[in-house]
Image (cartoon, rainbow, N blue to C red):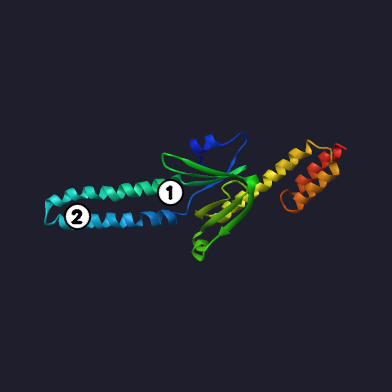
Amino acid sequence: MMVVDHYIQGMLGENERIMLITRQHWFVLFSAILLEIVVTLVVIIGIMIASFTNPLAGFAFLLVIIPLISMAHDILNWKNRQYIVTNRRVIQIFGIFNKSVIDSSLEKVNDVKMTQSFLGRVFDYGDIEIMTASEQGINLFKRIGDPVKFKTSMLNARENQSFEETSSHISRTDNIPGLIVELDELRKKGIINEAEFQLKKKELLAKM
């Protein structure tokens, strides 16, 4: 079950649903805290060796607090940087206390590019580049986990939005034959299945 915090829930519009939440790959976190882990271990080992000749060396354990605080900060930064796909938009949230939010409406998305290195394919991470018609132009999400699922969820949400707009258009127009052709195109593209096509077609024919 997807766990959604109150901050994210409060940003959602009426009838807006979350399709996917992801973060940067754990490699990103590991590379950020690796040096801090090494420094912590070196300090601890050095203090333990020094304590055999100088009992007061034990107080130097307080130095361990510095890399531990830095490590906790990096972990919180990683945890609070989230990439979200809803049925209306793509949202990027980052910041521990002060939050920054960048979102792109699905209807303004022109193209989606995914880049994966060899290691990215092995460990399942990659970059997602979203090109939009908005002022920011391009959103780049670097080294996110499961990029294929992210891209698929985003494209599916966009296609479902197109289907919902077409369905709404059906209820507002009398161009029945043209709408049936539009529905048939959606069926051929796989956006709607045969059962959905036949149901909408039947509804349209009933209005003639």
Question: Residue 172, can we see it?
Answer: yes
Q: Of discs 2 and 1, which sits in the foreground?
A: 1
- Please provide percent x and percent y for residue 186: 75, 49
Residue 78 marker: 1
The residue shown at (11%, 54%) is 54
The residue shown at (32%, 54%) is 36
Tag 1 or tag 2, which sits nearer the N-term? 2
Q: Nearer the viewer, residue 109 or 151?
A: 109
Question: Residue 157, can we see it?
Answer: no
Quarter of the image where one finds residue 39: bottom left
- Please provide percent x and percent y for residue 128: 55, 55
The residue shown at (79%, 42%) is 200
Residue type pointed to by label 1: Trp
Tell me if mark 2 has few (under 14), some (14-19) or many (20+) residues whose alpha carbon lies within 10 angstroms of its own: many
Residue type pointed to by label 2: Ile
The residue shown at (67%, 44%) is 161
Q: Can you name the residue that lies furthest to the front here?
A: 135
- Please provide percent x and percent y for residue 101: 51, 42
Residue 30 marker: none
Q: Secondary structure at mark 2?
A: helix
Looking at the image, residue 87 sits to the left or right of residue 54; the answer is right
Looking at the image, residue 88 sits to the left or right of residue 173; the answer is left
What residue did someone put label 2 on? 47
Quarter of the image where one finds residue 89: top right
